[in-house]
Image (spheres, helix red, strand yellow):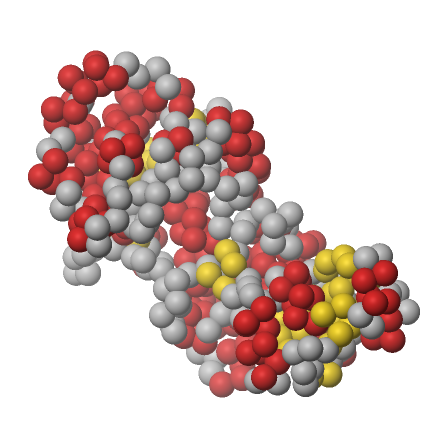
Amino acid sequence: MADTAFMPESALLRTLFERGYVYQITDEAALDEYAKTEMPIAYAGYDATASSLHVGHLVSIMMLRRLQQAGGKPVVLMGGGTTKIGDPTDKEKSRPILTEEEIQSNIESIKSVFEKFLKFGDGPTDAVMVNNDDWLSEIKYIEFLRDYGKLFTINKMIMQDTVKRRLENEQPYTFLEFNYALLQAYDFVELNRRLKVRLQLGGSDQWGNITNGTELCRRVENTQAFGFTTPLLTTASGAKMGKTVGGAVWLNADLKSPYDYWQFWRNTEDGDVIKFLKLFTDLSMEAIAELEAFKGPKINDAKIALADAATTMLHGAEAAKEAKLAAEKVFNQGATAEGMPSFDVPFADVEAGYSVVDAFVLSGLSASKGEVRRHIKAGAAKLNGVSIADDSALINVSDLEEDKSARLSIGKKRHARLNAV
């Protein structure tokens, strides 16, 4: 872990230290000198395994934002090439192989998110986006093994946590996946050659891959490159950041509405509010210190400040305002709000009687029928504000409002609207 007594002088490391991003740094004194005396150029990589990134990716995106705010140049590396393999790091089984068309479609869908956090352009500190398929697809296998394969030892590679765990559990670890570490390290070399990148940012689970890259830059390019990782982010209760009963917290609005996104941050555990304000918003440290003084019920004001700031950054001020107003209408008045996530059910199905269990699963409020039944048993599942007593209950036409909708709720804070169409 990074030396907590280290006092950085560069604007970049000062910010990263005081806001809690730091876990490991390959050479913090040398990195600090580089960031202080030159324009730091850094990258973070993202494989296109889905059509959207999720909140788990947000720490590295925010680090690129901090880099740009400190006068550095961010490089967003899309893994068009490495996605064809799938990053095995911290995975218990192989990822499904995507087609080139699926990968390209995912990249196009992901691109717009970065424009919310970074300024792109042709200026010296403007962010750029590159695709590692541009060079990985051109690699000649024999030449690559001759030039780079000899610099990696099997002895070291099988000591990485993911590999050890798979082997110990007698789970398959394919030769395809084994190559991922080589290709990620080679990405660093190519980015150093093409864009003079000298710093890679990532999560702590990437430390082995990152240090492979810094070592390869040293041996092949005679360049001192740096690695910087953040702690594995968990909530105060120990859950993995960004995982909810409804699944991943996606960054694309078509997968996670601004209302749901605002609610995610509003429902932050008390013990995480200040940490998340530092990591995921641009609020000043002075403003955050004032919010940190809030105790008891007033801590909800800090949660609202977090939800407002985080949602504004991703979806814009107007969407954040609408989400907040929608939440107030639902919580304070029990009304159905326009910003509430909704889903459609054929009107004929409601006429015939539509299962409340199926409705809660379809709404995304619960991940499975078993989870719905547990909520019903606990008295947490409600239809139009009234607790559901029986998991065999049906939603009928008589349950619909004038606009042919019904409100589903889990507890006091999570709601969705069923539209009979």
Q: Residue at x 46, y 59 (%)?
A: 242
Judged left or right of residue 405, residue 309 is: left
Residue 25, given in percent of the width and then of the height, sits at 21, 47
| Depth check, front residue: 169 or 284 | 169
Can residue 47 be seen? yes
Count the numbered circles shown.
Answer: 0
What quarter of the picture does the N terminus occupy?
bottom left
Quadrant in the picture for residue 133: top left
Point out the residue furthest to the right here.
402
Residue placed most toward the observer, 312 or 40: 312
Q: Is residue 272 above or below residue 132?
A: below
Q: Which residue does the image show at 48% across and 26% down from the upper left?
A: 100
- Provide residue 56's location: percent of width, then percent of height: 43, 53
Q: Is residue 119 above or below residue 21?
A: above
Q: Toward which corner of the image does residue 407 lie, by quadrant?
A: bottom right
Residue 28 visible here: no
